């Protein structure tokens, strides 16, 4: 049965903010657009057809643009300001994900010419309203780091406590006391020593840790 409507229908997209901590800095993966409008860098995004659920669209885009599967993915907010896309009315449901950069296999999709990491403090001019989406995602991330253990999502299989502290400091924008941070993270009983140590430069080798149960790394504390 065919239907007709009096008013045009907006397009719906899923836009994804991919966060990682690289070179001791919070960074976001951006894609250089290959076509008009706005031949600028921006977020991974996908038009969501009426045959796919929003989460499915976001996960498909993560897989195709970043080679990511089975990662933490959280719906962030909806962005639908009139004129945000000059082609038509577009409503974007934004998501964000956290991952160690070593797990990523970024590749430019059909609508992109390149993919690249950018420090959150050194973002270039962005397409559409992607700067606003990243700002909101950063605020959500910082807030969640204050009341949950989501920061462990950034870590590789083995890591030092200093590396973990850098993640929390970069995500929250706060300098943390080393002793208090270590006391707090160990008290949660979420990580365990591996029995191995990591040596960097002239510093004394540091104990390597692992996550005991990956399914518990985003618990509310």
Image (cartoon, grey):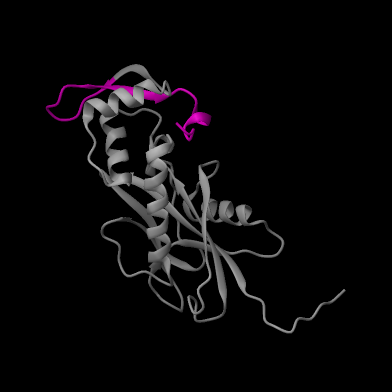
Q: State whether residue 21 is above or below residue 202.
A: below
Instruction: Specify the quadrant of the image occupied by residue 164.
Output: top left
Nearest to the observer: residue 134 or residue 154: 134
Instruction: Answer yes or no: is residue 42 visible.
Output: no
**How far from the left and from the top, in percent, is residue 59?**
57, 51
Name the residue at 43% across, 46% down. 104
**How far from the left and from the top, in percent, is residue 36?**
46, 79
Name the residue at 35% across, 26% down. 185
Magenta residue check for 214: yes
- Quadrant that contains the C terminus: top left
Q: How many marks?
A: 0
Q: State whether residue 214 is above or below residue 7.
A: above
**How far from the left and from the top, in percent, is residue 90?**
56, 73
Instruction: Answer yes or no: is residue 199 visible.
Output: yes
**How far from the left and from the top, in percent, is residue 114?**
40, 63
Q: State whether residue 91 is above or below residue 24.
A: below
Left-right relation of 54 to 165: right
Left-right relation of 46 to 143: right
The span picked out in magenta is 197-221
Which residue extends farthest bottom? 6
């Amino acid at each position: 049965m065919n239907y007709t409507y009096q008013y045009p229908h907006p397009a719906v997209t899923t836009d994804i903010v991919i966060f990682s901590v690289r070179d001791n800095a919070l960074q976001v993966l951006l894609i250089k657009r290959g076509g008009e409008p706005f031949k600028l860098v921006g977020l991974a995004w996908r038009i969501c057809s009426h045959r796919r659920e929003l989460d499915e669209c976001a996960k498909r885009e993560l897989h195709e643009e970043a080679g990511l599967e089975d990662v933490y993915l959280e719906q962030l907010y909806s962005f639908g300001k009139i004129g945000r896309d000059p082609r038509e009315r577009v409503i974007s449901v934004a998501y964000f994900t956290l991952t160690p950069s070593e797990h990523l296999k970024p590749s430019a999709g059909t609508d992109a010419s390149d993919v690249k990491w950018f420090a959150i403090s050194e973002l270039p001019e962005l397409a559409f309203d992607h700067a606003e989406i990243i700002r909101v995602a950063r605020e959500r991330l910082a807030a969640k780091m204050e009341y949950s253990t989501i920061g462990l999502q950034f870590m590789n299989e083995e890591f030092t406590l200093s590396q973990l502290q850098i993640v929390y400091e970069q995500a929250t924008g706060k300098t943390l006391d080393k002793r208090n941070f270590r006391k707090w993270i160990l008290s949660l009983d979420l990580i365990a020593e591996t029995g191995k140590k990591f040596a960097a430069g002239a510093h004394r080798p540091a104990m390597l840790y692992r996550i005991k149960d990956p399914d518990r790394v985003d618990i509310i504390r």
